[in-house]
Image: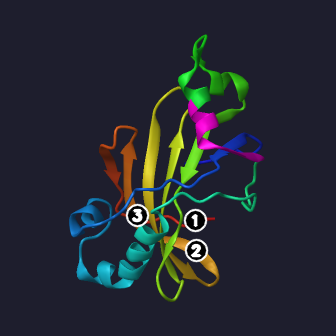
């Protein structure tokens, strides 16, 4: 989910809700199924489920290299479903935006050193990618410790990366 410098980034104003990670089966789809992961991230997973029962409103507190805007989900949905010419009304209204990003609320462990979060990028011309992230705070910076699965717009798992990447 890369963001090109200078390109307008659109972020859904409300967090995504209702994406609970309930069972061991749900966890093993996207994260390691061993006991070590469950011990390290169990309280973060429980908090993730608690925090994502209802949507929350995001505020302009993102530190991004490119300009961004927060749009309500209903406005994005209206623009995405209205077809105009060769694309959507969203693509027509925001031609310098490559779709929009939606995120969940973050679930933290008790010590607030580990976290679980969901993010999705929906392109202007259909399609999208969704991803869960398991993060750990090291030296005052958050880094991905366990790469979650990536799924296409239909929810089919495409990739389960073996290596984790660092988050800037």
* Towards the viewer: 19 or 113: 19
The residue under label 1 is 167
Q: Do the residues labelled 2 and 1 touch (CB within 8 Å)?
A: yes
Q: Earlier in the sequence, mark 2 or mark 1?
A: 2
* Badge 3: residue crowd in 10 Å (few <14, some 14–19, many ≥20): many
Q: Indicate left or right for 35 with 124 as reference.
A: left
Provide residue 19's location: percent of width, then percent of height: 40, 57
What range is drawn magenta here? Answer: 67-77
The reply to whether residue 97 is visible in this rendering is yes
Pick the quarter of the image with the C terminus.
Answer: bottom right
Q: Name the residue under label 2.
A: 142
Mark 2, other Cα within 10 Å: few <14 / some 14–19 / many ≥20: some
What residue would you read off at disc 3?
Answer: 147
Nearer to us in this view, 168 or 70: 70
Q: Is residue 39 left or right of residue 107?
A: left
Residue plotted at (39% across, 51% down): 150
Q: Tell me how far mark 2 sits from mark 1, CA to CA.
A: 6 Å
Q: Residue at x 62, y 84 (%)?
A: 139
Residue 147, quarter of picture: bottom left
Pointers 3 and 1 in contact (C-beta within 8 Å) = no
- Residue 18, given in percent of the width and then of the height, sits at 41, 56
Quick one: label 3 or label 2, which is nearer the N terminus?
2
- Image side of residue 95 versus residue 17, left or right: right
Q: Which element carries disc 1, helix, strand or loop?
A: loop
The label number, if any, that marks residue 90 in the structure image: none
Q: How far apart are marks 3 and 1 (CA)?
A: 11 Å
Label 2 SS: strand
């Amino acid at each position: 989910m890369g963001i090109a410098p200078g390109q307008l980034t659109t972020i859904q104003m409300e967090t995504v809700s209702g994406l609970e990670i309930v069972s061991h089966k749900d966890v093993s789809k996207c994260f390691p199924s061993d006991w070590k992961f469950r011990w390290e991230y169990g309280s973060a997973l429980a908090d993730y489920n608690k925090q994502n029962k209802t949507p929350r409103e995001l505020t302009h507190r993102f530190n991004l290299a490119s300009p961004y805007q927060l749009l309500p989900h209903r406005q994005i949905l209206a623009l995405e479903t209205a077809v105009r010419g060769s694309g959507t009304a969203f693509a027509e209204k925001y031609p310098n935006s490559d779709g929009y990003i939606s995120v969940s609320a973050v679930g933290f462990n008790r010590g607030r050193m580990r976290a679980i979060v969901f993010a999705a990028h929906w392109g202007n011309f259909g399609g999208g990618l969704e991803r869960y992230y398991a993060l750990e705070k090291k030296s005052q910076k958050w880094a991905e410790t366990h790469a979650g699965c990536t799924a296409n717009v239909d929810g089919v798992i495409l990739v389960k990366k073996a290596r984790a990447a660092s988050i800037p």
